[in-house]
Amino acid sequence: MKVLGGPASQLLGSRVAREIGCELAIVEFKQFPDGELYLRVTEELDGDTLVVQSTTSNDDIVYLLQLIDAASDGYLRVVIPYFGYARQDKRFKLGEPISARAIAQTIGADEAYVVNIHDPASLDYFQLRSGKKAVSLSAARLIGTHLKSMEFTSPLLIAPDEGATALVSDVSQAMGCEFDVLVKKRVTSEHVEIQPKTVDVDAREVIVVDDMISTGGTMAEAIKLLRGQGARQVHVACIHPVLSLNARLRLYRAGVDSIIATDTIEKAESVISVAPLIKDGIEGR
Ligand code: R5P
């Protein structure tokens, strides 16, 4: 099997190839003056290919489709560590597309893997040519193990909203630490208000965990609230560090101690690699 790392996942693609012990192919990418994208796999494939490419931008989606087409002759596994548009997984208002479905249906592969997709129900939108079901792998255990290695003295995990409860519960099991949940109300697309639950965070190291940090609005409110309640340290951890716009400024201004994330999106904060998770997911199939 050869691994093709897309432009958004060069590091993770390389780590996956090393983890599995197979060859990493060289792919060239470029953009034409009119904005169209081009890529070329510079070597022959052996009929068994693994594509790794997150879709954090529209260009990433085009590159993913090009990689799939370039490798479509043999057996093809596609890993989309961060599957963009996953939050538009329903028709919330009349006339809207189900964007997650529109994109999932373009994935012409034999197997597809994503990491902590926003809602696992979206996996049914993939129509794989083998008839197999797409798989969402959970990085909760990797995050829990990493947090445990930080050797906090009195840690408490917090889910910033009820939607994050299952994830935080899984992280807490791996870490061996208790958790609680805050209640979130979204006011606009960029602003959220958080109503505190009765959480005694005084003098504790609090780690707020969510599937993704996008604008940082959810986390910034949580950090301020927890600081106000006397938390000694407040860290944030997420699977997908989207960190759009001025998210980092908002988090540090709110008083965060550190931002911890995985490499489903390759950012400075991506200190946990999901490569072992992808290896286990593929080999366990
Ligand atoms: C929401 O459903 C997600 O789990 C995250 O809480 C949300 O996407 C974070 O967005 P932001 O960083 O913009 O508040």
Image (cartoon, rainbow, N blue to C red):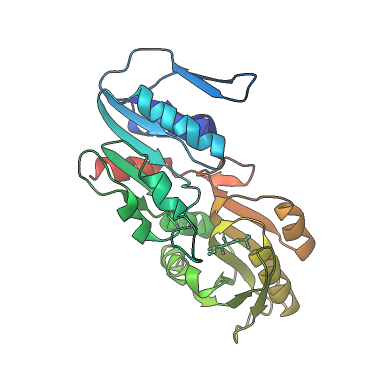
Q: For the C terminus, which image quadrant?
A: top left
Residue at (30%, 48%) from the top-left corner? Answer: 134
Residue 192 screen position, x and y as percent? 67, 71
In the image as oriented, which residue stretches furthest toward the bottom? Answer: 198
Classify 248 as above or below 21. below
In the image as oriented, which residue stretches furthest toward the right? Answer: 253
Ligand 1 lies in which image quarter? bottom right
Residue 42 screen position, x and y as percent? 43, 13
Residue 190 screen position, x and y as percent? 69, 63
Snapshot quadrant of residue 221: bottom right
* Residue 18 visible in image: no
Tell me: 9 left or right of 230: left
In the image as oriented, which residue stretches furthest toward the front? Answer: 95
Viewer-proximal residue among 170 and 112: 112
Classify 217 as above or below 11. below
Residue at (63%, 22%) from the top-left corner? Answer: 34
Snapshot quadrant of residue 197: bottom right
